Image: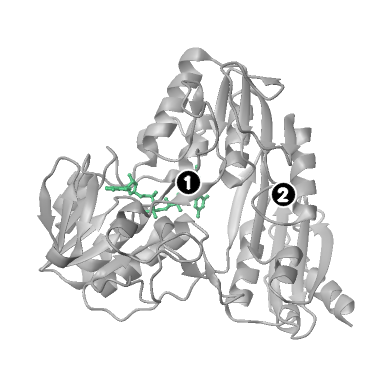
Amino acid sequence: MRLVVIGGVAAGLSAASRARRLDRSLDILVLEKGGVISYGACGLPYFIEGQVASFDELVVYTPEYFRRERAIEVRTGATVASIAHARRQVTLAGGERIAYDKLVIATGARPRCSGIEGASLPHVFTMQNAEDAQRLRSFLDQRQPRRAVVIGGGYIGLEAAGALRAQGLAVTLYCASPDLAGRDDDQLTGALTRHLERCRVEVRTGTAVNIIEPGRVLDTPCDMVLLAAGLEPNTELAAEAGIEIGRSGAIRTDDRLETNLGGIFAAGDCAQTRHIVTGSPAWIPRGTTANKMGRIAGANAVGGRERFAGVVGTSMVRVCGLAVAFTGLSAAQARNEGFQPVTARVEAKDRAKYFRARPTSVELVADARSRRLLGATVIGEWEVAGRINVVATALTRGMTVEDLENLDLAYAPPYAPVWDPLLLAAQQLLRNLR
Ligand SMILES: Cc1cc2nc3c(=O)[nH]c(=O)nc-3n(C[C@H](O)[C@H](O)[C@H](O)COP(=O)(O)OP(=O)(O)OC[C@H]3O[C@@H](n4cnc5c(N)ncnc54)[C@H](O)[C@@H]3O)c2cc1C
């Protein structure tokens, strides 16, 4: 039996590796159109800012490693042009046909560039994959630009703005939406805007860019442009093969990650999932999710019966030294979903005062009717991941505010204050719920 996997990064290689672990005799072939596999795309901003000195540090495994250690064949420069499921065959761009018994589609996502005139000018960059990052880093090293415009205020745009500031460029960030970080949350956008402006990044939210000119974007002169105006899932290959696309625009699967064509699975940024808080279909492309979905698709492709439970939308980003994390729904999102949101926000210290404590802010959202937690935002310099992960766990288990208030969270002066900011926020939320 042969498993073919399309895409050689997080989801694709997780699928191939899990399938190998469960079935030693399977023939496994991974087809990747790019030249590099298994790298940490999440590390690209740190390569751009210079904290990661060489791109090679981001590469986890090579095709040779997969061949030698896992008996998985990986072909780079192999673009799948079509899938003929009736014949169980994929065709490569050069015309070569490859047979499969089971197929995992893990084709990822790409930056949205349509509708922006000038997006292919030579001084315009994206930061999505290995090639993009290497091209951008060479431009920075060789041309030493002084002024950059970043188009897009989602997490990639925010990270790019921070990386380019760290390289000493003057940065202006345009964002078509009034919100930053892709979250309908005024407090979060306000805090991020103030922080970016303190770091001398000019922020223009609510300003759509439709045209990039050679030396300027709108009224901002610049030497380079970083385009990060959103992502779209790579679904064309699947759609042309007759695979259903979901409401979110990504590939629709069941909870075993199998598509409507039996024997074809989809995982990672190209696939739709389910939001655990709302129960609705969602597309929230993240590396964590891609790895988990890949493992499950790989197991099920070799006969497993594993389920992917869905996501609560946990995200974290570092913006010019500040960690911003959120999970679940903001109050505005909760209202749109038909909940009756009540919020509480506390400004507290992230550890004992005498241990160089830094300010941190926690906002919690709960539903007034059920008292169930719906979401949270944590902003600070330290201990942000731990706090958002507690709320992500609470959301996954459907916990109430009382459940959170009663949690036995750790305390030691160097790491947390005796009243953790999460518990203070839960107490405040209970008062607001009365
Ligand atoms: C700058 C940046 C920072 C990020 N930071 C974070 C972070 O901090 N935390 C987090 O959770 N996530 C982060 N992410 C997101 C994370 O990297 C992605 O969610 C993850 O890489 C998705 O994995 P994937 O395997 O689904 O898709 P991808 O990594 O996009 O891989 C898909 C692969 O499929 C290949 N492919 C596509 N079509 C074909 C075809 N027809 N034939 C053959 N091959 C094909 C592509 O070349 C690509 O290599 C970041 C992403 C970027 C770009």
Q: In x, y percent, where is residue 349?
A: 80, 57
Q: What residue is pinned by disc 1?
A: 42
Left or right: 389, with 114 as reference point: right
Q: Considering the numbered disc 1 on the image, is that residue within a helix, a strand or a loop?
A: helix
**Nearer to the camera, 8 or 182:** 182
- Amino acid type, mark 2: Asp
Q: In x, y percent, where is residue 133?
A: 44, 32
Establish whether ligand 1 lies closer than 8 Å to the Cβ of label 1.
yes
Which corner quadrant holds the C terminus?
Answer: bottom right
**Nearer to the camera, 1 or 295:** 1
Which corner quadrant holds the N terminus?
Answer: bottom left
In this view, 163 is above or below 277: above
Q: Residue furthest top?
A: 143
Left or right: 164, with 188 as reference point: left
Q: Is residue 312 visible?
A: yes
Q: In x, y percent, where is residue 81?
A: 23, 47
- Amino acid type, mark 1: Cys
Distance from label 2 to label 1 (Cα)?
Answer: 22 Å
Give the residue drawn at x 69%, y 69%: 375
Q: What residue is pinned by disc 2?
A: 179
In the image, which is nearer the foreground, mark 2 or mark 1?
Answer: 2
Q: Residue furthest bottom?
A: 370
Q: Quadrant of residue 174?
A: top right
Q: Quadrant of residue 263?
A: bottom left
The earlier-in-sequence mark between 2 and 1 is: 1
Instruction: Judge the density around disc 2: few (<14), some (14-19), many (≥20) Cα neighbours within 10 Å.
Output: many
